[in-house]
Image (cartoon, grey):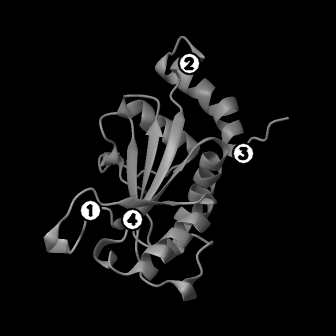
């Protein structure tokens, strides 16, 4: 038997029938699904400090459970003392079981730890059905030891879906449990 996370089962058993009914899909293949989650952390002004870049790499690896990779600069930029090929950030692309496990930990454990949390913005969808959110502090993850933090750096999380419509992607993510802010009108 193949291992499935709780959110994979939730998607197959509950979310797919709800989306078919809501949008009137004729085939199960039309139902939007989560393709991947990309977590990216740029190091900003600390590109010259190798220790901070390595620490950022280990933090993202601990949070996601998958080895992070470096992102390198593509060209020189003298204003930032940046040379082509220097590491400027780290990223991880999660798919399948690890993606669903990260999503579950994000929704159930990490987001409730954000101070004064009212939900995530609805206007962070691109017009291709993908959603981007930023995390200001990495300390919301229980995998991070607060005493070992070198610099407080946030991260960007991108949810890539199979749909090209923002409304369908928003329905999919809200059924998973991502808490979107309520509109001022409603």
Q: Which residue position is annotated with label 1?
A: 84
Q: Which residue position is annotated with label 4?
A: 89
Looking at the image, is mark 1 or mark 2 earlier in the sequence? 2
How far is the residue under mark 1 from the one under mark 2? 43 Å
Quick one: quadrant of the N terminus?
A: top right
Q: Nearer the viewer, mark 1 or mark 4?
A: 1
Q: Quadrant of residue 96?
A: top right
Q: Which residue position is annotated with label 3?
A: 6
Q: Nearer the viewer, mark 2 or mark 4?
A: 4
Left or right? Give the position of 127 relative to 5. left
Residue furthest right in the image: 1
How far is the residue under mark 2 from the one under mark 4? 36 Å
Q: Which residue position is annotated with label 2?
A: 29
Compared to residue 20, the image places residue 67 above or below, namely below
Q: Nearer the viewer, mark 2 or mark 3?
A: 2
Q: Count of labels shown?
A: 4
Q: Nearer the viewer, residue 149 or 166?
A: 149
Q: Nearer the viewer, mark 4 or mark 3?
A: 4
How far is the residue under mark 1 from the one under mark 3? 43 Å
Question: Is residue 115 shown to the viewer in this render?
Answer: no
Residue 85 lies, in percent from the top left, at: 32, 62
Q: Residue at x 58, y 75 (%)?
A: 144
How far is the residue under mark 2 from the one under mark 3? 21 Å
């Amino acid at each position: 038997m193949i291992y499935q996370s709780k959110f994979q089962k939730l998607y197959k058993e509950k979310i797919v029938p709800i989306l078919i009914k809501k949008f009137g899909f004729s085939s199960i293949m039309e139902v939007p699904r989560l393709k991947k989650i990309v977590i990216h952390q740029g190091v900003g002004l600390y590109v010259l400090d190798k220790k901070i870049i390595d620490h950022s790499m280990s933090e993202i690896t601990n949070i996601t459970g998958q080895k992070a990779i470096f992102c390198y600069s593509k060209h020189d930029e003298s204003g930032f003392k940046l040379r082509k090929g220097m590491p400027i950030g780290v990223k991880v692309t999660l798919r399948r079981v690890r993606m669903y496990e990260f999503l579950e930990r994000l929704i159930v454990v990490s987001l409730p730890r954000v101070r004064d949390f009212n939900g995530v913005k609805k206007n962070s969808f691109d017009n291709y059905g993908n959603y981007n959110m930023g995390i200001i502090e990495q300390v919301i993850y229980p995998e991070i030891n607060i005493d070992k933090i070198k610099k407080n750096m946030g991260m960007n999380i991108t949810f890539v879906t199979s749909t090209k419509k923002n409304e369908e992607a928003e329905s999919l993510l809200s059924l998973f449990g991502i808490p979107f802010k309520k509109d001022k009108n409603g």
